Image (cartoon, rainbow, N blue to C red):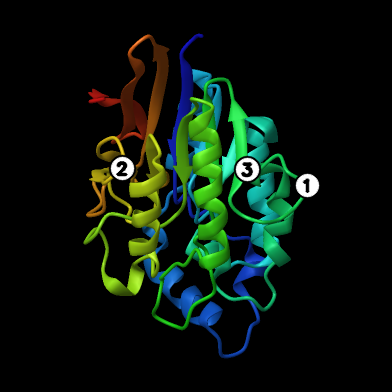
Amino acid sequence: MSTFRLAHLSDPHLAPPESAMRGGGLSKRVLSRFAWRRKRHRHDPAVLDAIAEDLRAAGPDHVAVTGDLTNFATAEEFAAAAVWLESLGHPSAVTVSPGNHDALVARGAPDRFAPWRPWLGDEADDDFPRVRVRGPVAIVNACSAVPTAPHLATGQLGGAQLDRLADVLTETGAKGLFRVLLLHHPIAPGVVSKRKSLDDAPALREILARHGAELVLHGHAHEALLNRVAGPAGPIPTMGVPSASTPAGHHDPAARWNLIEIAPGAAGFQVRIEARGVVPGPAVQPVGAYVLAA
């Protein structure tokens, strides 16, 4: 089997259409609009365009986007994000795991992320996790995005999704597939503050410790991260990337995406990472490369 090339980017925070900036009364959405006006300089459409162009030029087999495409979870933003997703590739080659901003509030947001259904998974049903088998890889798409109270950015998988996830990991592991778990929130302890954390991360870590996965990809922290959590055959790497739209020279880490090369072999899978990020310009270039230890 040939090498499978998986691109990972996250938290693009697409510039909202003007219509998404109006209405809503007194709500978390209104508070978030005020925050966006203060922080919009952290997300530059030109930087995101450069990242997307560099990613397309690399020609990966599949693209994983781990959430926060929108800012206020309005219908207008979901429609605009669908157009952007189409620019990355065919829906069968792009998978989206929704983020907390994509579920900011329930009112006025598309039900069950409906406009993104072609990018969520192959199954006809709407339940997470969704599974996509591509060559030697099982892309397991979990959803940690839930509406929360003002000033909170927590996530939750919930008992039903966790139960299904345990079954999915067992089934795909028994087939010898390289299991990549996608979700928006990081799962390693201490990566983000409590108000931004995954509420049931301990339960998820217990499932991974029993049933295993080969790699976990997340966003949310807006940082380049590599952590590990316990698995049945050894530590499982968990990786995050900065926002795909943050310009270089800002106090936040500059935009980056990872090209993950997964090569099956007689002794198991070999995994090589090439990180590509912006420098002032914006230009995108290699910013690091390494191999994940088996």
The residue that mark 1 highlights is: 124
The secondary element bearing badge 2 is classed as loop
Q: Residue at x 58, y 51 (%)?
A: 129
Q: Earlier in the sequence, mark 3 or mark 1?
A: 3
Q: Earlier in the sequence, mark 2 or mark 3?
A: 3
* Residue 167: x %, y % from top left: 55, 48
Estimate the spatial distance between the alpha carbons at disc 2 and disc 1, rounded to whole Å.
31 Å
Q: Residue at x 40, y 26 (%)?
A: 259
The residue that mark 3 highlights is: 84
Estimate the spatial distance between the alpha carbons at disc 2 and disc 3, rounded to whole Å.
36 Å
Give the crowd class for mark 2: few <14, some 14-19, many >=20 residues within 10 Å: some
Q: Earlier in the sequence, mark 2 or mark 1?
A: 1
**Depth-wise, is mark 2 or mark 3 nearer the camera?**
2
Q: Amino acid at mark 2?
A: Gly
Rendered position, 23 above or below 48: below
Q: Amino acid at mark 3?
A: Trp
Q: In the rendered image, which quarter contains the C terminus? A: top left
Rendered position, 160 above or below 124: below
Left or right, 67 with reference to 186 = right
* Residue 64: x %, y % from top left: 51, 38
Q: Which mark is residue 231?
A: 2
Estimate the spatial distance between the alpha carbons at disc 3 and disc 1, rounded to whole Å.
23 Å
**Depth-wise, is mark 2 or mark 1 nearer the camera?**
2
Left or right, 40 with reference to 193 = right
The secondary element bearing badge 1 is classed as loop
